[in-house]
Amino acid sequence: MKKNLYLTALLLGVSTASFSQTDLHQKIEDESKKIESKVISWRRDFHEHPELGNQEVRTAGIIANHLRSLGIEVQEKVSFTGVVGVLKGGKPGPVIALRADMDGLPVTERVDVPFKSKVRTVYNEQETGVMHACGHDSHVAILMGVAEVLAGMKNELQGTVKFIFQPAEEGVSDKGQAFGADGMIKAGALENPKVDVIFGLHINSQTPSGVIAYKAGPIMAAVDEMNFVIKGKQTHGAYPWEGADPIVAASQIVTSLQTIVSRNVKLTEAPAVVTVGAIHGGIRHNIIPEEVKMIGTIRTLGKEQRVMVHRRIKEIAENTGKALGVDVDVEIVNGYPVTINDVNLTKQMLPTLEMSAGKANIVEVPPTMGAEDFSYFQEKVPGVFFFLGGMDPKKSPSQVAPHHTPDFYLDETGFVLGVKTLSNMVVDYGNMSQPIDTKSAKKGKKSK
């Protein structure tokens, strides 16, 4: 008899929890639709007033004021301009972080919209426009919407939610100290209270609105910089045998670097990219210069692969220089690590993604060679990062502009799905992390 009573109580507890969770999902659905116009309005305002990395003062102020109006604890100036909000739910549970990046890019906008950016600045000694050409304005607006939805059901939430609004995801001109996600972590954004898991999204202008793209494991590449200084011996262009030509050496280095991907990388396991982006050297048609400088980017998808590619770049460049009688100095600057979605957590949250967007609108994608400093957070705690569609479903990717371009444009109808999905992830993970406590099962209680 006691055993039957125990099982009845246990089942009752599960049933009650399930009903409550379903109820919250419906509330999230309703509230997300109610604030859709507000989210779009926020995004348009941020789009019209973009700010570069570590300069997001206006953006951060609007965020902080909004969070305070919702009764959320707010910490400002975290790693320059970062904002962290803490919402304590009415029930015990995990600490779940949600992240949005705030910075714009040194890009002059060409899109003719009423909220077009007219902001100008000087970047790397060049005058340029400033534009949200990667969608960070939508990330901020979506997370502000999530904060409003979740604050409205605070008493029903299991656990604590940390809203992390991060500056400088795109980097800063002066990289003398930690910035972006790395800076936020070092400033304590994942502590007090200590974060258990983190979720984030990135809008994608070439994925249809209403669609979510995801991948367990590596989803975005590590990004590193390579810098070369090739020093030869200057001479008259008519008498090359009297000098050592750094231009010929640079040309051979560029060509030989391509063999790393084609001959050293195990392409069946993961792709890689080695790209020289600029070459500077010489001043006149008949002078062989003394020096040539080159810069480029490296993209890899695994730790061992990253080490191997770095090693081969140095070997090729330095030995080519020796063969041609020039000195080659190679500097590789480590950038963001690989963005790796925790495999178990991704599987655990996949039903939530499917429920939020509809199973037909969930697409598993191969990894992209783009990079994201969300990866720093994932090195500290398990995380899931996914792509949110921001393209007019009537168009194809070839018809729309990619990210980081003057013609970048977002279809705003997809924003509400971002609000709904992140909110559902908080509710569902909080429920998953609250297993039935057998000692209190008779009362239908739960504990962490």
Image (cartoon, grey):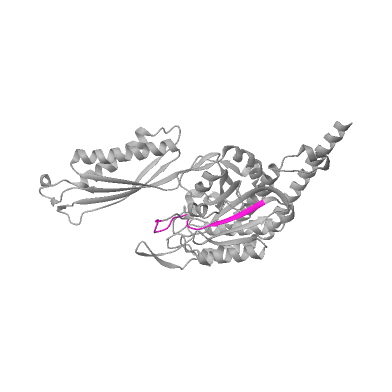
Residue in the image at 73% along x and 43% along y: 447
Left or right: residue 65 versus residue 241 is: right
Q: Position of residue 308 (x, y in %)?
A: 37, 36
Residue 151, picture quadrant = bottom right
Query: The C terminus lies in which quarter of the figure?
Result: top right
Q: Position of residue 341 (x, y in %)?
A: 55, 42
Total numbered circles? 0
Residue in the image at 58% along x and 42% along y: 363
**Is 250 in front, or is 312?**
312
Query: The N terminus lies in which quarter of the figure?
Result: top right
**Is 290 in front, or is 353?**
290
| Magenta segment includes 384 | no
Residue 339 lies, with reference to residue 103, above or below; the image says above
Residue 257, picture quadrant = top left
Residue 180 lies, with reference to residue 57, above or below; the image says above
Q: Position of residue 188 (x, y in %)?
A: 54, 54
Q: Is residue 113 visible from the viewing direction of this image?
A: no
Residue in the image at 80% along x and 44% along y: 16
Left or right: residue 208 versus residue 35 is: left
Q: Is residue 22 visible from the viewing direction of this image?
A: yes
| Magenta segment includes 164 | yes
Q: Position of residue 287 (x, y in %)?
A: 15, 53
Please give the range of residues in magenta: 160-176
